[in-house]
Amino acid sequence: AADGWPLLREGIDRVVADWSAARGRLCTEAEVDRTRPRDEADEGRRCLDEQAEVLVGFLGALERVEGQDLDRAFTVLGQLTPAGVCLDAGLLAQRPALPEDERERERAASLRAAIARYDGEFLGDAGLDGAKALLAEAEELGYPPLIAEAAMRVSRASLRSGDFTAAASHGERAFLLAGGQANDALAIDAAAMLGQIAYEQAEHETGARWVAIGRMLAERSPVELSFPEIHLAQSSAAVALGRGALAEAHDGYLETLAGYRRWLPAEHVEIGKVLMGDCIAESKRGRQEQAEQACKQGLAIIDRSLPRLHANRALALNNAAVMYLDAGEVEPALPLLRECLEIYVATRGADHPDVGLAHHNIGIALLDGGHPADSLPEFEAALANWSERLREDHPMFAYPLTGKGRALVELGRSAEAVAPLRRALALRGGEDVLPADLGETQFALARALAADEGTSEEVRSLAEAAAANYRRADGEEEAAKVESWLAEQPGQG
C-alpha cells in the first residue's frame, strides 16, 4: 500500500486544482462569455465558497493530525465532492435559498459554512459530537433545510461509529425534511444512505424500499441530479447484492462506475471501491474470470490510493477473500481476512461491528478449510462483538450461529449444536433471508438432530426444505448433496 503523507499531498493538490479550475470556468462563463445566468452563477459561487470552507476544515484538522487520524484524513479526502458539481445547473437549482430575514440569513450562512468546515474535518470519535452540535444549532435557528443537512451529518457519524439505529433515525429525519422542502438532491442522498444502512444490517427488503423511493424521486425531478443519483446507484447495487439479485447488482455497479468516471480521476479510491463491490457480484454469479479482473483493478487502485492501515482497504481485502472462498480456495483467503481484521481493530476499534464480521469470515474460511475447532473461537468472537451493538433478535446473528452449529456438528458435538442452530433458524424467518442462507441453517440443523436422535420427521422436513431453498438460489450442487445425505440416513429409501 502507498506511503501516507506524500499520497495525501498529491490528493490535496488535485482537490485545489479542481476547485481553481471550476472557479475559473464559472467566472469565464458568467463574466466573459455571458453563457451562464447571473442567479445561477451567484449560487455557483456560494457553492464554491462552501467547498473552500470544506478545505479550510480539512487543512485545519491536518495540522493536528496524529496516529490513526491519518486514516480518517484519507477517508475525508476520498469523499470530498468534486468542485464540478458547483457548475451543475440541476444541482444548483436544488440548493435551498437562505431565509429572507437579514439576521436569520446571516446566521444560516454562518451555519452553512460551519457545516462545510465540519465536512472537511476528520474528528474520529468527536465527529458525532460535532455533528450533534451542528444539529442543535440548526434546530435553534429553526431553518428546515439546514436541520436536514445537519441530521444527515449525525446519521453518517452514527453509521461510522457502528450505531445503526441512530444512523437510520437521523437519516429518516433528513429524508422527510428534505422531501418537505422539495430538495430532491438531499432526499435522494438520504434514501441512498438509508439503503446502505439497511444493507449493512442484512435488512435487504428495507434497503430495496429505500432505493425504490430514491429512484422515484430521481425520475420525477425536473432536473438531472448527477451526484445524488450516482450515490443511489451505488446503494442500489449493494442492496441488490444483499438480496442475491446478482445481475442487478452488477448492472448497478456498472452504472455507478460510469457516473463516477464522469466526475472523478480514473485512480480515485471511490472507483476502486465500486470495482471491489462488482468483484463480489461477479464472483457470486460464478463468473470468476470477471471477478478476478474487477478485484485486480480495484485492489490496485486502493493500494495506490490509501495507506496500509485504512478501513476501506480492509473492505477491499475482505471482498478479495470472499472471491477466493466462492471459488473454493481457502488458503489465499485466510491471510487476507486476518489482515482485514487487524486493520479494522486498528482503525475502528475492537468493539466496532465490522470487527465481528471479520471474525465471522475468518471462521467460515477455517470451517470450509477443514479446521472446525479453530473456527469456533472466531464465531464466538463475532457473537460477543455483535452482542454489544445489535439487538438480540437481529438477523445478522444467524450467520455466526449457523457457523458455530456447523463446526460443532463436524466436531461430533451435535447435541451442543442444536440450540445455536434453532436460534439461527428462528432469526432466519423474516422477509430478508436469502434462500441459500436459510437452506444452510436447515441442513445444519437436520444433521445435528439426525446425529442426536436419528432420522425423525423433523429431520426429513428440514432436509427437504433445505434442498428446495438451495434450488431457489440456483444451488443445484448443494441441493443434490442434501438429498444424497438424506437418502443415506437410516430408514430412508
Image: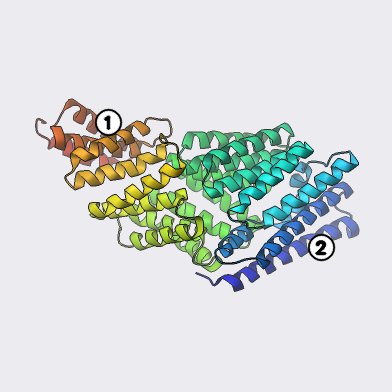
- Residue 247 at what x, y percent from top left? 46, 44
* Marked residue nearer the N-terminal end (1 or 2): 2
- Dot 1 amino acid type: Ala
- Residue 461 at what x, y percent from top left? 23, 28
Q: Is residue 477 visible?
A: no
> Is residue 286 left or right of 253 when viewed as pictured?
left
> Is residue 423 left or right of 129 when viewed as pictured?
left
| Label total for image | 2
Measure how far apart labels 1 and 2 are at the Cα level. 65 Å
The residue tagged 1 is: 465
Residue sitting nearer the eye, 187 or 214: 187
- Residue 19 at what x, y percent from top left? 75, 62
Residue drawn 30% across the image and 58% down it: 330
The quadrant of the image that shows the C terminus is top left
Name the secondary structure under disc 1.
helix
Label 1 Cα crowd, 10 Å radius (few <14 / some 14-19 / many 20+): some
Name the secondary structure under disc 2.
helix
> Is residue 117 left or right of 389 when viewed as pictured?
right
Residue drawn 51% across the image and 62% down it: 310
Label 2 Cα crowd, 10 Å radius (few <14 / some 14-19 / many 20+): few
> Is residue 100 left or right of 466 when viewed as pictured?
right
The residue tagged 2 is: 24
Residue drawn 34% across the image and 44% down it: 400
Residue sitting nearer the eye, 190 or 348: 348
In the image, residue 460 sits, relative to residue 230, either above or below, namely above
Residue sitting nearer the eye, 138 or 481: 138
Q: Are marks 1 and 2 in contact (CB under 8 Å)?
A: no
The quarter of the picture where residue 124 lies is bottom right
- Dot 2 amino acid type: Gly
